[in-house]
Each structure stands twice: as structure tokens, then as C-alpha cells.
Image (cartoon, coloured by chain):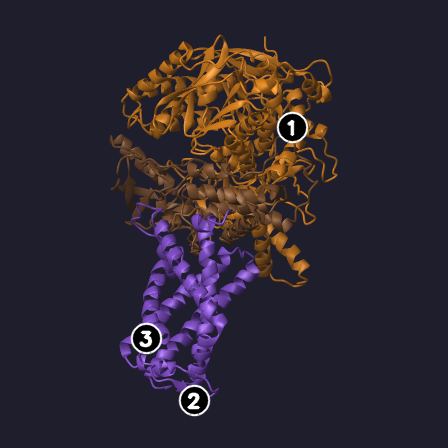
Chain colours: A purple, B brown, C orange
């Protein structure tokens, strides 16, 4: 195998999908960890998002994180493009379809719908960037007012931006739907990534399956709780 | 589904009528269409293919074209039969080939839709018969152990771990029917290829060619126009020989290891 | 007249070694210029194509299936014998030789059988090297079982799929040669004639089954490895496509046919359910190890099997053959079942079946299991439950298959079984080198007559196919090919090719133009009924004579009232089948003639006129210790030639299982 086969052979392409997928999963861990800081406010109403803003400010000033951001973008880019390529190539392998389909008798609907779920996530991602990433890095719209953090640094008040953004029901609903898509995408993607990388031992596969289901439920659930919590006034 | 849903010992035999909606196509160059037929007075003791035999006899006697389909051993081992019945390769019974499927699986008055395997890599030859020679070329690419006749050492000279021998055998049970391709939404042949790679990779005799085998067989599979695997599991669910999808994970491992360790 | 070319210089156990040391060789550069045609790619054909390709011959291989891996060798369940003596239980080449000769009821050639036993050990080595996943013990070494009532454990196996695994091994070896360019594979091609030039086989005419076009192929030699002709009975355990056409065409071109009437009827098959039946399914012989065979003691008893009390059951094999009981050889078990059914004791709706009962085995295993688990007062239900688990472990796949086909649960009710045609020991006559009476035309595997005499032992068919292909033909072919090195490849424009192709085309046209009313299938069924009733498990002179005249009538009807739909130049399975059935009809006549002239009972051939007062087979060595070899002389005409069988080492004795 030469390196180009990573992008030309069927298994190579899938290896790329799984490596980038697993990388994005680690990103989700960091993301949920940082954003989870908003819940400090639910326990301690005097926090006012300080813990979260400190975490956000740390992420913004840490050079390793800044570099990783580019890697992350590359990861997203490759995962999305390769995903679309895989989806369309595979669809082209059966020019004439069946009159009656196998459907759920052979596989789970979400396993067959990774392309669709991925596309929904891509659209969600664009909206999400527009809501948060572009303001925080470029326009500073909605966060013009700097905030003094309890550790002495000065940062953007991302907490207030979230609060403002999630004041509208349609946005909350879109975010919850995005999280549901993410859950189903992970439900297949998590264990599939390990299979693609060659994990074939039943013992470990069972472990990864269980871990994958747990991860696919818990992480998107925490994400979904964020807009809901703001809207329902549990925090903020 | 099992043939006998808890009926104890015996199963009542009866005669039923079924409607058939069957794909008809003159040859690979012409477009096909569905035709409907009525199979009357079919004993539930008949196999699915015997029902087709009876129907064909009637068609011929009436001066009509019979339906062409692939079949040979009719005992579930040769892998020739290949019908996609009511949306499932080899029909509704679990771990059963079309030839072993019996008419008691169907109800009186039921409409049964029968289609050929559909995949670009399996072009239709006629009606329900498809060309599966792509599988031959995949085997030619490396699905063997290079040992000339007469070169062998004594059969017991190399002991083989029993568990590995058993796993190798379980993979080698593949009959090459192509149901996995037919069921896969991507028309992928990964279950077929992985069964062969696993069969040979688990045996010490297959070790010397282990890496090139995985690389070459996958390259040929891609060249034949099969899709990639997205681990949906449809192949495993319909495989008449219950070949495990874990073989695909093993193939991935073999491929990755071969790729990373090769010097080219 | 008939020279088997057996090396006479040395005693039996040295003949093959001597032959190998003295046969002619072809140098590698010459091999590259010599072309070999292999028809049929089952165990014999695929192994021959692979071995000859490895030697450097230019091989063309043909099969009618869509892939060589589908050949019916794949369906063999039990195993393959080899005189390895891995179990230290006293096996040897001599014992395997002796068992095979005796099992064949002294109607096989000693030298061939001894060679078979000798190379049996190489086969196992070769197959293991190819990656055939034989069953193994925990120590990693090969496992053996005893099969078909032999006293030693010499059968190697891969669960119940030994044939499949061996065929895939040979198939892969052949595909490797395809990849290397030494073998060219033509699938969905059916051989329809042999092309003869100057008295030698020089090629074949094939029909491309996809396009319907006739194609010509040249070869310095032609190997026929096309399997058995059990489908002459319509219902058999053979695959639907198994046919006699290739060897029949060769027969009509001058290859003599050896022992055509020798047919093996396997005792444990699933019975016929009705007129729609298209084939019969074999249940492995191993089921007789634990199952008990019985019929009711009362004629026409319509009660369900479980309602018939123990004392009203007739375990007829145990009664007639107390020494071997349910494990008597295939021919004996089959005839005994037929005897009971004919006498009106048969069971099931058709009354053409006997019970194979596992109730005792389930209880026996259940008790052992309860003992193992230290359950001292286990009740009946627990014992049965435990017993079923054990039986499931040992025979689960066979029980599942039975349930799928019959819709009956064999754990609850006894299985119904009946004998079915399984294997044909007869085939083209070949000499020690596997060459037929046509120079340059060889015949391997089940298609030839050579190794099994009048009855084949279990687990020996796979052994013969691979022996012929891997280890015999690569040597014996040299003797002929060494004289062919100056023969340039003959163009397929040669008039002989043209004429043969025209004859084939004419026959196809003739078939298509009958435009009658009856289907191919209906003729085949009629033929099958004649053969089964009059040339089946028991034969008599009167019946055989009737059968011959009935078959001649059938032939007339066939050629005047056959209907084939579709066209010639397209995929047309009905046309393919028509050609095969036409040949089966002619073969049927010859089988009856052969059975008629052999007025003795031996192996699978039972002449009612030749039996002991107790109804056992009576073999007549002083009159019939020969191979009957038939020369085709024109429509309905054959001439019988006899190859005398000399038994120098294995002296004939009576088979007794009492």
C-alpha cells in the first residue's frame, strides 16, 4: 500500500474516515468538557458563567490548542469530503435498485444513513460556527464587552453570548435536533471506527460497543441540555 | 425465522396459491421488467425452486418463455442459487439458501417478489441469473496458498491451534453465493473477501503470503466495481452460512498492517 | 484386446514406484508447447488442471457451472480416507487397499486400488499445505474418525463439509494457475463432442451457454473429469446439472464404457414427497452410528411413530444382521429398506420410507450426561433434555437440514429415510494410466470406472478424485505426451473441427425443430421411473428386458414429441437439459444391457436371480470376475469386451455381516 491508497482504495478511504472520526470524537470530549462548565452556574448561581468563560479564555490563549484548531479543521474537512465521496461512490455501485428493500431486516437505519446524518450535522455545524465560532474569533458581535475573569485574565463573555443565542425557541430546537443527529451518527460511527481499524476480537468489540452506546447517548445529551437549560432558565 | 415456529413434531402440509412478481430480462444488453405469474396448487412440501420448476413446466406447456435462474446442488452448499426474494437474498429463512427454502414459509394468496442480485459488478445474464465471475478474479488475485503439488510436508508436521483452525474453518464455509453483495447497500464484497483472507491468514501455511494477499484481493475487489464496507451488518444478517462480520474487521487489520509494513 | 498396461515386472506393492521410475518424461521447454484440455472442474478436474499447470502444460479448463467452485464434489459430507495411521490403530496402505477391494466386492483392479491407497497419504499432506481446514485435536494435530463401518480411524474431515473444503483447496490451486497464465478457465461452457484427428483425441466442441454459440478448442490431449451419471435415475443426490454428456460423447467416439450398471444407492436420504420432487438430499451416513432403523411390525400401520409401542416395532437391520446391526454397508442397508417397503411395511404418506429413530440415543446420551454432571436421580424429562443437547452437538446441522426440508422436528419424531441413487462406480474404461480406449483421451474421478469395483466405501470418492488429479495423471500423461512433442498445435480450422462442429450444430437444430408437446423434464422423469423400478436396487432379467424396450420407446417419443422453448443462440437451460436427457436415455439402455448380462449379485448390483436362500447377494467369481467394457457400435448396438480381473493379493472372500 502506498499512501495514495488511503484515498483511493475502499478500505483506505474508510481508514481515513475512522481516524478522522475518532479524532473528532476526542474533540467532542474536550468540547463537552469545556462547555459543561456552564453548569457550574446551575449549582452556584454566583458563578455567572465565570468558570466557563475562564475555560474558554484558556482555550483561546493556549498555543497548543490554537495549533490543534487547525488540525481540527483539517480533520473536519477530510472527514466531510471523504464522507461525501464514500457515500456517493457507494451509491453508484448499484445502478438499478431493488423493488423491495431489505431495510431494517439486515441493518439499523442509522447505520445505513450515515451520509444523511453527516449532512445534517454539516448544516448544523455551519449554523453553529456562525453562532459562536465566527463571533468569538472574528466579528466579536454580541461579545463586544470584555469581561474580567476571577483568575485575573480578561476574556470574551461567551456565557452571555450563549444565553442570548439560546433565548429563541427555534434555535434551541435546531440545536436539540443537531444533538440527536449527532447521537445516531455516533451510535454507528463509534464502533464502526474501531472495526475499520481492525479490532476483531469479540471481547474488545463487545466493550467498544457498550462504550460507544454510552458515549453516543451521554455526550449529545449533555450538549442538548445546554440550550435547553438556558431557555428553561436553569442556568444564566 | 425458523422453519418450525414451535409446532412441536409435525407440520401440516397443504396446498397454496401464490402470485409471483418476477424480473424478466432477455440478456445483459436489453432492459428488463417485472412479469407476474400465478403458481397454483403449490404443495407446502415443495422447495422454492421446485415451485419454479412446476411453474416453468406450465409455462413451457403453454408455449411461453420459462424463467431462467441459477441453481445446481439444491442442498445448500454449491452457492449457485441466487434469488432476492421479497427484499431479502435467499428469502425469509435465516441461514438458508434459496434451494433449501420451502413453500411453507409463504401464505396462501401471498405475492412474492423475486429479483436478481443487483450490483454493477454482477451484471444480469438473463432473468434471475447474474454473472459472478468477479469473484473468480478476486480469488485469482491472491485467494490461495502458493504450494505446488508434491511440495507438501507431512500433514502433522505443523500443528495448528485448534481455536484458530476452527475459526479458519468457519470463514472457509463461505459458499461464494454473493448474497452479501446483494444485501449490502454499497454492493460491497467485503464479507466474501474477508472470509477468504481470514481463512488463509489464520493458518500457518497462509502466513508467507498474508500481506500481499490482503492488499491484492482488496485491490481486485475495488477494480471489479464493488463498493466499500460501512459496517452496516446486512451481509452477516443474510449470509446463508452465517459468516461473521468480524471477519471484515480482521481483513481491515490485515490490510492496515500490510499497508503500514510494506516498503512500497 | 484390452490391455490395462499394468506394470508386470514387479509385485503389487511396487508397481506404482516402478511405474514412476520408468515412465517417460517431457522436458519443461516442451511442456510449454503442449496443450491440455480438462473438461469438468470438480475435485478430479481442478486438481488435474492445477497440477498440470504447475508442470508447465498449457491447460484449458471447462465447466458448465458459473464457477469451478460449484462442482458437485462440494456436496460430499463425510470425509476423505488416507492410510496415515496417525491414530496408531493398525492402519496401513495395505489395509486401505484391502478394505477398498473387499468393499468393492472384488470387482476392481488390484493395481489401481493399491496405487490409490499409496497416494492417499500425499493427498492429506497436499491439502493441508493448501490450507484445507481439517478438524484438529487440541494439541493442534489432525483429527480422524471412523467412517462407514471400518475398523480403523482413517477418515479426515472438516465438520460435515469435507467435500467443500477439498474442492475449494483444489479450486484455489487452479485459480492460482489461472493467475499465472498456465490455465485458462472457461466457465458456463458445456462440452458437446470430442474432435478426433488421425485416431487421436485432439480437441473438443463446446457450447458457450451464455451466448449459445459453438466454440472449438484444440488440445494435444483431452481429460474428462465430469463426474458421475446418477441423474439417469432423474431423482438422485447429484446436483441438477450433473450429466453423462461429456463421457457419452466420448463413448460414441470410441471410448469404451466400463461397468455401466454399477450404481451405489445410499440408504439414508430424505424420502420423496411428491411428483414435484426435483432431487434427493443425503443425510450423512454418520447418522446410522447412533440412530436405530425400524418399521412397524404390522403392514400398512397408519399410526404416528410415537404411538407405536416398542414391541410392535421391527428393528429389521438388528434382526437380520446381529453382528453389524444398523452399521451394515450401504448396499445391504438400502436393499433391506426396499425389502420392507415392498413388503408393505413402509411408513409416511408415500409408504416408501423407514424410520431412523434417535429416541434411544437421546436417552442413552442423556443418562451419560446426567452421570457426568453428578445428577443422581435425574427424572426422565431432564435426561431427555440433556440427551437432546448432546445429539444437537453431534448432529445439529443434519437435524436442522431435515427440519427445513420436511417440516418435522427430528428431536421429537423419528426421521423418515429412504435409499437414493448416490454414486456411479461405472464410467469410461481406463487403463492404469487413466487413458480410455481412445488415444489421448483420459478420464479421471467418478467419470471413470476404475477404483471402486461394484460398491464404493464411504469417504473414498474424494480420495479417488484427488489421487487421479494431483498424483496420477501428472506422471502417466508423460508417457503419451513425450511422443507428442513434435506435434504442433493444430488449427481449429482443420476439417475435423469443422465436421464435428457441424454434427453438433445439426443435432442441436434437430432437437430444436422437433417442436412437439412434451417437456424435457417429463421425459427425464419417465426415464428415471423406468431406471429406478427396473434397474435400481434390485434387478431381474425380465424387468431389464422390459426396461430396454421401454427406453427404446421413450427415445422415439423424445425425438418426435419434445418441446424446447427459446432459441439456440441465447442462454437456454431447457436446450442444455434436452441434450443431456437425450444422452441419459441412450445410457439407460446400456446400463440395462450391462445389468442383464451380469447375472450375479455383487456390491450395488443385485440380481434377484442370484441370491442365497436367506435373500443375501450371491456373487459368482468363476463366471463374472471381469470388468464389462462396452464398445459403441451404432444406434442401440454395443459389443461387450471383458477385462479379466486377477486377484493375486486380495483373495476373494464372501462378504458377511450376519
Rendered location of residue A26, percent (x, y) = 48, 68
Where residue C553 sits, quadrant-wise, is top left
- Viewer-proximal residue among C371 and B126: B126
Please indicate whether residue C69 sits to the left or right of residue C372 in the image: left
Question: Mark 3 — residue?
Answer: A139
- In the displayed structure, B101 sits above or below C68; it is below
Where residue C511 sits, quadrant-wise, is top left
Q: Are marks 1 and 3 in contact (CB under 8 Å)?
A: no
Rendered location of residue B169, percent (x, y) = 57, 45
Task: Give the letter of the chain under mark 1.
Answer: C
Q: Which mark is residue C100?
A: 1
Residue located 64% across and 37% down the image: C155
- In the displayed structure, C199 sits above or below C45; it is above
Residue located 43% across and 89% down the image: A47
Residue C434 visible, this angle: no
- In the displayed structure, C603 sits above or below C84; it is above
Question: Mark 2 — residue?
Answer: A47
Please indicate whether residue A123 sits to the left or right of residue C593 in the image: left
Q: Quadrant of the C terminus of chain A?
A: bottom left
- SS at mark 3? helix
Dot 1 alpha-carbon crowd within 10 angstroms: few under 14, some 14 to 19, many 20 or more: many
Dot 2 alpha-carbon crowd within 10 angstroms: few under 14, some 14 to 19, many 20 or more: some
**Distance of label 3 from label 2 (alpha carbons):** 26 Å
Amino acid at each position: 500500500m502506498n499512501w495514495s491508497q488511503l484515498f483511493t482504495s475502499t478500505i483506505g478511504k474508510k481508514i481515513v474516515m475512522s481516524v478522522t472520526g475518532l479524532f473528532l470524537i476526542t474533540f467532542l470530549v474536550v468540547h463537552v468538557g469545556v462547555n459543561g462548565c456552564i453548569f457550574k452556574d446551575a449549582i452556584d448561581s454566583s458563578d455567572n458563567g465565570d468558570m466557563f468563560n475562564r475555560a474558554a479564555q484558556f482555550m483561546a490563549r493556549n498555543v497548543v490548542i490554537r495549533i490543534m484548531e487547525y488540525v481540527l479543521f483539517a480533520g473536519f474537512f477530510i472527514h466531510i469530503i471523504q464522507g461525501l465521496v464514500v457515500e456517493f461512490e457507494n451509491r453508484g455501485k448499484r445502478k438499478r435498485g431493488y423493488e423491495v428493500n431489505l431495510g431494517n431486516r439486515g441493518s439499523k437505519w442509522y447505520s445505513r444513513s450515515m451520509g444523511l446524518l453527516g449532512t445534517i450535522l454539516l448544516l448544523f455545524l455551519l449554523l453553529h460556527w456562525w453562532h459562536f465560532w465566527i463571533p468569538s474569533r472574528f466579528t466579536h458581535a454580541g461579545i463586544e464587552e470584555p469581561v474580567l475573569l476571577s483568575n485575573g485574565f480578561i476574556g470574551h463573555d461567551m456565557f452571555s453570548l450563549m444565553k442570548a443565542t439560546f433565548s429563541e425557541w427555534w434555535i434551541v430546537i435546531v440545536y436539540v435536533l443537531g444533538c440527536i443527529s449527532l447521537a445516531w451518527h455516533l451510535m454507528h460511527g463509534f464502533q464502526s471506527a474501531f472495526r475499520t481499524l481492525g479490532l476483531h476480537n469479540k471481547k474488545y468489540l463487545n466493550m467498544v460497543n457498550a462504550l460507544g452506546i454510552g458515549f453516543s447517548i451521554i455526550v449529545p445529551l449533555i450538549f442538548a441540555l445546554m440550550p435547553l437549560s438556558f431557555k428553561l432558565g436553569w442556568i444564566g | 425465522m425458523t422453519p418450525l415456529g414451535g409446532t412441536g413434531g409435525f407440520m401440516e402440509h397443504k396446498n397454496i396459491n401464490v402470485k409471483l412478481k418476477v424480473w424478466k430480462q432477455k440478456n445483459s444488453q436489453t432492459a428488463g421488467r417485472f412479469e407476474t405469474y400465478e403458481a397454483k396448487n403449490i404443495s407446502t412440501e415443495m422447495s422454492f425452486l421446485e415451485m419454479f420448476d412446476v411453474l416453468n413446466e406450465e409455462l413451457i406447456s403453454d408455449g411461453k418463455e420459462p424463467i431462467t435462474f441459477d441453481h445446481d446442488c439444491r442442498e445448500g452448499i454449491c452457492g449457485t442459487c441466487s434469488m432476492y426474494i421479497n427484499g431479502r437474498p435467499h428469502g425469509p429463512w435465516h441461514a438458508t439458501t434459496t434451494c433449501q427454502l420451502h413453500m411453507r414459509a409463504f401464505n396462501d394468496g401471498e405475492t412474492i417478489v423475486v429479483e436478481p442480485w443487483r450490483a454493477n459488478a454482477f451484471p444480469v445474464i438473463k432473468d434471475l441469473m447474474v454473472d459472478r465471475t468477479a469473484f473468480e478474479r478476486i480469488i485469482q488475485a491472491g485467494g490461495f496458498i502458493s504450494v505446488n503439488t508434491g511440495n507438501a510436508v507431512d500433514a502433522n508436521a505443523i500443528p495448528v491451534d485448534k481455536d484458530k483452525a476452527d475459526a479458519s474453518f468457519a470463514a472457509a464455509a463461505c459458499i461464494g453465493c454473493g448474497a452479501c453483495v446483494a444485501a449490502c447497500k454499497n454492493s460491497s464484497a467485503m464479507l466474501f473477501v474477508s472470509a477468504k483472507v481470514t481463512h488463509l491468514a489464520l493458518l500457518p501455511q497462509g502466513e508467507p503470503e498474508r500481506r500481499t494477499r490482503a492488499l491484492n484481493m482488496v485491490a481486485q475487489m475495488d477494480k471489479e466495481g464493488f463498493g466499500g464496507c460501512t459496517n452496516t451488518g446486512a451481509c452477516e444478517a443474510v449470509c446463508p452460512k452465517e459468516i461473521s462480520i468480524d471477519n471484515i474487521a480482521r481483513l481491515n487489520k490485515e490490510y492496515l498492517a500490510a499497508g503500514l509494513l510494506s516498503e512500497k | 484386446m484390452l490391455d490395462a498396461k499394468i506394470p508386470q515386472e514387479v509385485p503389487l506393492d511396487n508397481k506404482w514406484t516402478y511405474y514412476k521410475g520408468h515412465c517417460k518424461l517431457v522436458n519443461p521447454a516442451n511442456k510449454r508447447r503442449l496443450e491440455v484440455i480438462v473438461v469438468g472442474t470438480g475435485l478430479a478436474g481442478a486438481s488435474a488442471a492445477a497440477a498440470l499447470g504447475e508442470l508447465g502444460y498449457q491447460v484449458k479448463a471447462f465447466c458448465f457451472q458459473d464457477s469451478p467452485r460449484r462442482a458437485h464434489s462440494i456436496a460430499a459430507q463425510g470425509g476423505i480416507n488416507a492410510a496415515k495411521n496417525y491414530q496408531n490403530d493398525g492402519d496401513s496402505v495395505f489395509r486401505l487397499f484391502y478394505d477398498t477391494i473387499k468393499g468393492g466386492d472384488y470387482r476392481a483392479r488390484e493395481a489401481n486400488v493399491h496405487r490409490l491407497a499409496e497416494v492417499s497419504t500425499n493427498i492429506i499432506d497436499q491439502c493441508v499445505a493448501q490450507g484445507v481446514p481439517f478438524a484438529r485435536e487440541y494439541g493442534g494435530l489432525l483429527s480422524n474418525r471412523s467412517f462407514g463401518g471400518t475398523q480403523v480411524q482413517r477418515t479426515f474431515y472438516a465438520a460435515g463439509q469435507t467435500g467443500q473444503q477439498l474442492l475449494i483447496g483444489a479450486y484455489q490451486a487452479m485459480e492460482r494457475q489461472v493467475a499465472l497464465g498456465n490455465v485458462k478457465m472457461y466457465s458456463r461452457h458445456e462440452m458437446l463432442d470430442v474432435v478426433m484427428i488421425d485416431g487421436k483425441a485432439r480437441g473438443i466442441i463446446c457450447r458457450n451457454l451464455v451466448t449459445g454459440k459453438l466454440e472449438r478448442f484444440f488440445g494435444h490431449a483431452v481429460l474428462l473429469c465430469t463426474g458421475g451419471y446418477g441423474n439417469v435415475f432423474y431423482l438422485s443426490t447429484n446436483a441438477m446439472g450433473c450429466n453423462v454428456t461429456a463421457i457419452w460423447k466420448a463413448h460414441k467416439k470410441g471410448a469404451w464404457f466400463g461397468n455401466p450398471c454399477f450404481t451405489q444407492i445410499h440408504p439414508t436420504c430424505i424420502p420423496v414427497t411428491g411428483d414435484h420432487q426435483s432431487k434427493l438430499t443425503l443425510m450423512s451416513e454418520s447418522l446410522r452410528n447412533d440412530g436405530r432403523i425400524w418399521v412397524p411390525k404390522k403392514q400398512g400401520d397408519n399410526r404416528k411413530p410415537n404411538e407405536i409401542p416398542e414391541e410392535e416395532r421391527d428393528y429389521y437391520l438388528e434382526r437380520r444382521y446381529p453382528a453389524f446391526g444398523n452399521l451394515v454397508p450401504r448396499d445391504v442397508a438400502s436393499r433391506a429398506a426396499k425389502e420392507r417397503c415392498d413388503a408393505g411395511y413402509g411408513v409416511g404418506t408415500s409408504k416408501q420410507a423407514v424410520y431412523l429413530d434417535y429416541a434411544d440415543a437421546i436417552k442413552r446420551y442423556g443418562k451419560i450426561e446426567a452421570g457426568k454432571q453428578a445428577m443422581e436421580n435425574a427424572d426422565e424429562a431432564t435426561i431427555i433434555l440433556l440427551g437432546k443437547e448432546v445429539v444437537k452437538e453431534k448432529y445439529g446441522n443434519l437435524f436442522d437440514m431435515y427440519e427445513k426440508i420436511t417440516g418435522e422436528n427430528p428431536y421429537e419424531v423419528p426421521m423418515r429415510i429412504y435409499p437414493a441413487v448416490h454414486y456411479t462406480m461405472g464410467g469410461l474404461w481406463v487403463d492404469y494410466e487413466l487413458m480410455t480406449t481412445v488415444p489421448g483421451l483420459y478420464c479421471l474421478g467418478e467419470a471413470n470406472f476404475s477404483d471402486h469395483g461394484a460398491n464404493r466405501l464411504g469417504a473414498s470418492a474424494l480420495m479417488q478424485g484427488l489421487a487421479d488429479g494431483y498424483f496420477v495423471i501428472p506422471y502417466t500423461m508423460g508417457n503419451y505426451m513425450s511422443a507428442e512433442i513434435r506435434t504442433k498445435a493444430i488449427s481449429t480450422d482443420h476439417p475435423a473441427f469443422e465436421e464435428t462442429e457441424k454434427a453438433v450444430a445439426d443435432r442441436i437444430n434437430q432437437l430444436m425443430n422437433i417442436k412437439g408437446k412434451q417437456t424435457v423434464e417429463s421425459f427425464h422423469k419417465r426415464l428415471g421411473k423406468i431406471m429406478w423400478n427396473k434397474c435400481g436396487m434390485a434387478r431381474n432379467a425380465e424387468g431389464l428386458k422390459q426396461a430396454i424396450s421401454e427406453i427404446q420407446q421413450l427415445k422415439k417419443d423424445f425425438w418426435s414429441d419434445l418441446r424446447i422453448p427459446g432459441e439456440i443462440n441465447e442462454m437456454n437451460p431447457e436446450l442444455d437439459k434436452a441434450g443431456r436427457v437425450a444422452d441419459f436415455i441412450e445410457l439407460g439402455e446400456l446400463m440395462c444391457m450391462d445389468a442383464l448380462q451380469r447375472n450375479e449379485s455383487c456390491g450395488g448390483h443385485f440380481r434377484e436371480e442370484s441370491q442365497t436362500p436367506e435373500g443375501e447377494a450371491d456373487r459368482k467369481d468363476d463366471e463374472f470376475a471381469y470388468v464389462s467394457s462396452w464398445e459403441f457400435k451404432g444406434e442401440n448396438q454395443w459389443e461387450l469386451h471383458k477385462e479379466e480381473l486377477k486377484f493375486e493379493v486380495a483373495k476373494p472372500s464372501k462378504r458377511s455381516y450376519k
